[in-house]
Image: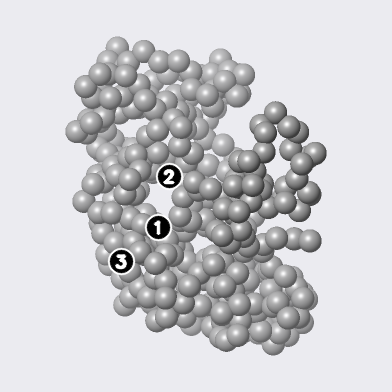
Amino acid sequence: MIITNLGKFHCIIVCKAYSLLNSNIVLESKIPVLVQLMLFICLSTIGNSQEIYSIQSFQYQNSKTFGFVSMTDIFRHSHHPDSLVIDPQNLGDFKFEDVNAHTVNEPYRTRFLSRLNIAVSDSIFIYSFKLDRCFSFPLSGLNLVAHLTMYGPDFPITQDQYLIGFEFGKDGLPYDLLGEYYYNAIASIASKNPFQTGETQRIIWEKTLEESMPDFELPEIAKRWKNEWIKTVVRNEVYRFTSVFYVYYLQSMERETGGGGRHLLVANSKTGKVIFNTFYFDSEGTYLLPLSGVDEMDNLEMGQWTGKLFPNKPPIIYGFYGNSFGCPSIDFIDKDLSPIYIRCDNRH
């Protein structure tokens, strides 16, 4: 049996049942397998942040371009005829023209959204780092669209070859404001806006002396590598940025064998204590973005941002990585909070 959705009510019941168990008793001896599975799902979802999605731009061969928020990154397909979310006429060995983007109509729209626990009355909220502005659109006014992955099709076509999500025209989400590829904009689907404006800012780095950096230990990520990467690193320029509550230090690094990295320290501006400590580095799936205010390639479409983007959450820091594989994430300036993974439906 596969559980694809677990309601909050069931989660509460299972978790309360677990809390009544003696912590010294082996879990398997007290809880049936199915309840263990429900408990695992419950405990792994409690405290997780609202899902955040990237915005992509797609273009038909007839030059129609639209913004698109894909949600199939977290969707579990069922291929049973009674569970399809793509009309059978768009599956199999049929012939099609262009990119085969089509509107998902009833009953497939309702079936798709219900499996993601998305309500008809929800809205999609889009935050632009570049503008520090939020746009909102009721889902009831948007088309749910499916289009084949850029790596397809692979005949016979199955529904998991489609990206499914909401479409925005140029008028609804203007390129002139957000940028042609919606590069630094993110989205969330909810009943109320999860973002806040007025408390984030673009980081403008200024060169400083290496001696100005506070004392630090190697971050946890370096310890997981057993310091092999660090042994070949040459540390270079140091940059600094100061906000009301924090001082940010960034040191560029490079390996003798090739490839670069950056070491970021964030310290409390009053105490000088380091509260965030991490590395960013080139890899097969990531590359370092230009530094705001430093690199010649610096522009408002890129760069780094920080501040309180989410109510009742610590400040974030964002914009160090570009991704050739996988999806980017948003870090919290808090060592105890995991980053928010931005769902981008990156299919490689």
Place residue 308 in its image quadrant: top left
Q: Which residue is mark 3?
A: 135
What residue appears at the point 53 percent right and 77 percent down from the top-left corner? 145
Q: Relative to 118, say whether 199 is above or below.
A: above
Give neighbour class at mark 2: few <14, some 14-19, many 20+ (Cα, 10 Å).
some
Q: Relative to 294, say whether 237 is above or below.
A: above
Query: In this view of the protein, which residue sits in the foreground, 97 or 263?
Result: 263
Q: CA distance from mark 2 to mark 1?
A: 11 Å
Residue 38 percent location from the top left of the image: 68, 52
Residue 148 percent location from the top left of the image: 62, 72
Residue 330 numbered tag: 2
Element on which disc 1 rests: strand
Amino acid on which the number 2 mark rests in the picture: Ile
Mark 2 vs 1: CB contact within 8 A: yes
Q: Which residue is mark 1?
A: 186
Query: In this view of the protein, which residue sits in the foreground, 268 or 343?
Result: 268
What residue appears at the point 56 percent right and 66 percent down from the top-left corner? 116
What residue appears at the point 50 percent right and 48 percent down from the top-left corner? 48
Residue 111 numbered tag: none
